[in-house]
Amino acid sequence: MKRQVKLLAVITLIAVLVMVSGCTDQNASGESGTELEETTQTKEATIGYVLWDGEIASTNVMKIVLEEAGYDVEIIAVDAGALYQGLADSQFDFTTSAWLPQTQKNYWETYGDDIDSVAVNLEDCKIGLVVPTYVTIDSIEELNDNKDQFEGEIIGIDPGAGIMQTTETAIDNYSLDYDLVASSSAGMAAELKNSISDEEWVVVTLWTPHWTFNSFDLKYLEDPNGVYGEADHVETLARVGLAEDDPELYGIIGRFNWTHDDIQSVMADLADGMPEDEAAQKWIDNNPEKVQEWIAAE
């Protein structure tokens, strides 16, 4: 009987020890799981952009730069109006695609109070009407007298772009008897290339920097009435609150700044058919010091 009692006591003790051990392990596992989750939490960033060659270039470069900094990055292409509205509504963290103060002035006036202006990333960006240099006029004022040569058309890009709205203003301001043909950045460039191949007269909405200025002999038509304004800059804009929510991300995009040579090298590769991620990676591989300046903490 005593032996049975002792055996029962031993079994009970073992059971208690197992239960205590289990609770301890569960607590330790819970704590370590929480710590692991905290230390491995993914950093995320969402970039909005417009489908212009320069903005495709800058956005894909920034995507890879942020991935090198440990971010999971999503890029979303929209038209200009949706870009500004998306930033104001915090649908995007930031964009490198804002042409200010002229080209996208109307969008800034509508949404600017709800958007954070971070930094200028590219200086001296011009827009206007452009023709091949073999075209023998030099001013917008001469377009009407040469309507038949241009078939009464100005070849544009996507209808929501600021340059298209400014060109509509130019048509009214100069009383041009022309139709503004909406297309896309790629469609406009293709029409320009085909016309030059046949030495036909063509007038397009264009801007610098743009790869076509490296590939063809082009000139801006003079704008004596100043409809297209002074040169713009390209600005990085962010959703309100990003600086507080993610100081690291905000610091990187605030340091992002490059030159016309930088962006046009990426644009030229894109125009030659190189995939967007490969063109961006090529530039990054060739400019490691600049990339590290953007990523490095101040």
Image (spheres, rainbow, N blue to C red):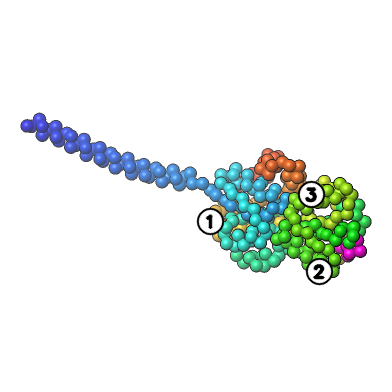
Measured Cα–Cα span from mark 3 to mark 2: 27 Å
Q: Which residue is drawn at 89% across and 61% down?
A: 147
Residue of label 2? 172
Kindly state the secondary structure of the residue where label 2 is placed.
Answer: helix
User: Residue 184 at x, y = what percent?
Assistant: 73, 54
User: Residue 28 at x, y = what percent?
Assistant: 35, 42
Asked if residue 143 lies in the magenta stretch, the reply is: yes
Q: Nearer the viewer, mark 1 or mark 2?
A: 2
Kindly state the secondary structure of the residue where label 3 is placed.
Answer: helix
* Type of the residue with mark 2: Asp
Q: Which residue is drawn at 90% across and 60% down?
A: 148
| Magenta portion: prevailing SS class | helix
Q: In this view, does 267 lie to the left or right of 43?
A: right
First in sequence, mark 1 or 3: give its number: 3
Residue of label 3? 190
* Type of the residue with mark 3: Ala
Dot 2 alpha-carbon crowd within 10 angstroms: few under 14, some 14 to 19, many 20 or more: few
Q: Residue at x 63, y 44 (%)?
A: 64
First in sequence, mark 1 or 2: give its number: 2
Residue of label 1? 245
Q: Residue at x 81, y 66 (%)?
A: 171
- The part of the image, by quadrant, that contains residue 83 is bottom right
Dot 1 alpha-carbon crowd within 10 angstroms: few under 14, some 14 to 19, many 20 or more: few
Q: Give the range drawn in magenta.
A: 140-146
User: Residue 160 at x, y = what percent?
Assistant: 70, 61
